[in-house]
Image: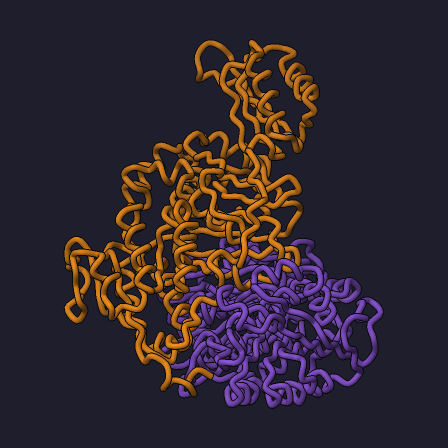
Chain colours: A orange, B purple
């Protein structure tokens, strides 16, 4: 179809890349190595004409393209049609993107923190100028999950989604599960392997996952980006004991980002979660990512792949470039961007994000108690008083390694209860004199009986 | 972006549905139930205005729309913008689609057999008239796999893909594996449950999967649709013994459609396959579908969901409708269909599809032999003579249920060998007088060490 009007169309689309680190370099390389393939798909060429980074990266041969040390030179270059922002961080990325938009250029970004926190402003500016800001690579690396939500599942009311959206965290939990190792040891290895940053806070405390969940939720429900409303809990407090108790009970512990539409409002939360080992997502291991999406018509679908890395992320950056060229159609007619930035043309801004206390969950509780007669009866009674059912229980032999006092670990799986109520019950349990440590609490997710 | 030019655009897109069976009825219902959601995504309404089927289906309230018993009345209706063809079969579906195209209408079809066999003709006609023919629902029901291949992974050279793309077959194999039941018994149950047709040939002999694989391969590699080149083998000869021997060796048996780009040409084959139980796709059970795609940049990605059913299939039909409206832009400017019908603007028509004899595989072999001394040595020597390595072996106790003669089942996993060579080795083994039955042969797929 397109070929027939090829002569009217711009024969070449010019790409400017701002930042030549891992993702920028990967994008540059991919556009070169698969140039023939991409041109055949598009019916016209997609070419890097301008690259900017603080210093020339000797890994990439940029001799044939214009090179600048000032990234703003790219967005001000009248030859550049699309700007790829892969600097990361807030500034100068934000100013750069806004200036690119102001200059009437389309933008592709892999910057999840920037989109999660400043996306509303960026998309509003893009809408005013009639340009597209694409960000498939910002969530789950090479998995085309934004496209699935906005387009493939566009016929559905999305009911919930849940994702393993941080590879580092999943690598750590997988190693803990498969080798019985503890958190600190695996983290150190992940850092040595380059999977985890020197400062691992963003990964292990769930902030990176919260950025991505913010973007997924906005696309699923057509709400504004609301990063500050995400309940975020990391994996640093998960012990290898928790992992093996969970396994004994038929569960895996995964660090999930979950968002769900309920009658009261929208759940938006990142935390370690027990999932039945029968579910496909429980078997997503190592650095891999996966997202399960439940639509009212399609049911559950799952999307799995590499969530990070130069080549996987570049795959999504270039897919966005291809989309922009395809949807831009004939530039002179000015009709780019026929898919709205956040899945919906208008926002459902009135639906509140729920506080974590308002959310109902089943729970895994791990307690350490003095081995005295009657303590289990007391705890059971207390849970009953708060309306909490015990669904499963593990009571272990005394752990004498803790010293001369005889402690017994107790693991309880509860029925569904509002978190507010659970907080009260846990406080009461911790007040018992036989309970010697803070209660460990991990949420359980059953995905409402869905097959996924 | 779109909103600004909304006044210039057609406020409503009119949909005509040909066929009010499962998928047609599901589409009609979904467009009604999620009308508000869809309108918000699109910025304009998508409305069914004309429906045709041999008789009025009392399940659906079509009082507000035009109803015809002649399906051609829909494609000739000047009010209809897009025709949904969900009749199935070749005729009148083919004539109907060609006439819709001739009339300048876009078409959405769920008809996999028709696209696999007549797609080249249909897409050529659509290209001439500048309209879109969309068929996401023809492959893997609600999973947006065509979109992933054509758009989400558009930056990649696809290296291979493998899919569980027939839910009935997967249901049967899952039941056999989980409950140790035999093929005929499970098939009868699947028919009773409505998962399998009264004539189950298309499902269990792999023809349905071959239709879908034809479409996937054309999208992955930019080749023409070549259904007649698919090697197709069904699951009816798999025994519950094979399933349990495979399990013992760490494998599951799945009915896969596989296509792979090699230096010699393209592999295109549907057959029962042993897959390591560690792979995600080996854990896709019941009627669910999944497709693994290996791209050179993204690595392996997997797409999972319901492969059939009114609601899941309707999800993809309506997604196609939404895509058409989005990409149609302003109809008066005539630039619909900015994604090519088969992923590529031009075809790589010169790449040959390989014969099954030219393909290299590892194999599972099951033999039944007289329990005589030396037979195993003879078989080993024979395999060695043909250059075939034995990677694993199970030799069972004699099976005395077969009568007074003492038969022993032997299971062998081989190394990689060209199928032509394996055919010769099997013929030679069957010539041995101690070998009492035809050798059962099932191909093993390792997915080249990929993590999926």
* Residue A196 seen by the camera: yes
Q: How many marks?
A: 0
Q: Residue at point 76% right, 73% down?
A: B65
Is residue A231 depicted above or below A289 in this figure?
above
Q: Residue at point 39% right, 37% down?
A: A204
Residue A208 x %, y %: 40, 43
Residue B170 x %, y %: 63, 63
Q: Nearer the viewer, residue B135 or A104?
A: A104
Left-right relation of B93 to B131: right
Q: Nearer the viewer, residue A109 or A242?
A: A109
Q: Residue at point 19% right, 63% down?
A: A60
Is residue B209 depicted above or below A28 in this figure?
below
Q: Which image quadrant for residue B156?
A: bottom left
Residue B31 x %, y %: 68, 65
* Residue B240 seen by the camera: no
Q: Nearer the viewer, residue A15 or A282?
A: A15
Q: Which image quadrant for residue B437?
A: bottom right
Is residue B429 depicted above or below A236 in this figure?
below
* Extreme residue toward the front, this view: B7
Residue A119 x %, y %: 41, 50
């Amino acid at each position: 179809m397109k070929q027939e009007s090829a002569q009217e169309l711009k024969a070449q689309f010019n790409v400017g890349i701002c930042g030549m680190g891992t993702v920028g370099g990967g994008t540059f390389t991919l556009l070169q190595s698969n140039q023939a393939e991409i041109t055949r798909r598009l019916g016209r060429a997609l070419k890097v004409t301008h690259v900017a980074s603080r210093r020339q990266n000797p890994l990439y041969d940029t001799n044939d393209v214009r090179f600048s040390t000032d990234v703003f030179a790219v967005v001000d270059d009248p030859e550049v049609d699309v700007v790829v922002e892969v600097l990361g961080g807030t500034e100068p990325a934000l100013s750069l993107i806004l200036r690119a938009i102001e200059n009437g250029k389309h933008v592709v970004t892999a910057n999840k923190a920037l989109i999660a926190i400043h996306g509303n402003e960026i998309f509003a500016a893009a809408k005013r100028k009639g340009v597209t800001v694409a960000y498939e690579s910002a969530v789950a690396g090479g998995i085309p999950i934004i496209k699935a939500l906005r387009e493939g599942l566009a016929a559905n009311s999305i009911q919930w989604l849940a994702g393993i959206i941080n590879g580092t965290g999943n690598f750590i939990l997988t190693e803990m599960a498969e080798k019985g190792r503890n958190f600190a040891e695996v983290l150190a290895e992940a850092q040595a392997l380059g999977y985890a940053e020197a400062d691992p806070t963003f990964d292990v405390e769930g902030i990176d996952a919260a950025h991505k969940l913010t973007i997924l939720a906005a696309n699923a429900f057509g709400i504004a980006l609301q990063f500050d409303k995400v309940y975020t809990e990391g994996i640093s407090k998960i012990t290898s004991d928790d992992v093996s108790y969970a396994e004994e009970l038929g569960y895996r512990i995964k660090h999930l980002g979950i968002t769900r539409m309920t009658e009261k409002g929208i759940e938006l939360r990142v935390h370690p979660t027990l999932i039945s080992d029968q579910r496909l997502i429980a078997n997503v291991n190592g650095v891999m990512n996966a997202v399960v999406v439940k639509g009212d018509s399609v049911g559950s679908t799952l999307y799995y792949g590499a969530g990070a890395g130069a080549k996987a992320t570049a795959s999504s950056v270039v897919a966005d470039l291809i989309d922009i060229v395809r949807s831009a159609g004939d530039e002179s007619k000015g009709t780019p961007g026929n898919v709205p930035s956040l899945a919906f043309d208008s926002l459902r801004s009135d639906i509140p994000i729920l506080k974590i206390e308002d959310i109902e969950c089943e729970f895994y509780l791990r307690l350490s108690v003095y081995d005295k007669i009657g303590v289990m009866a007391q705890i059971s009674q207390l849970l009953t008083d708060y309306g909490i059912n015990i669904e499963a229980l593990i009571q272990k032999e005394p752990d004498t390694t803790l010293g001369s006092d005889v402690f017994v670990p107790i693991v309880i799986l509860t029925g569904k209860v509002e978190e507010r109520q659970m907080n009260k019950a846990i406080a009461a349990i911790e007040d018992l004199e036989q309970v010697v440590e803070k209660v460990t609490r991990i949420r359980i997710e059953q995905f409402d009986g869905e097959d996924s």
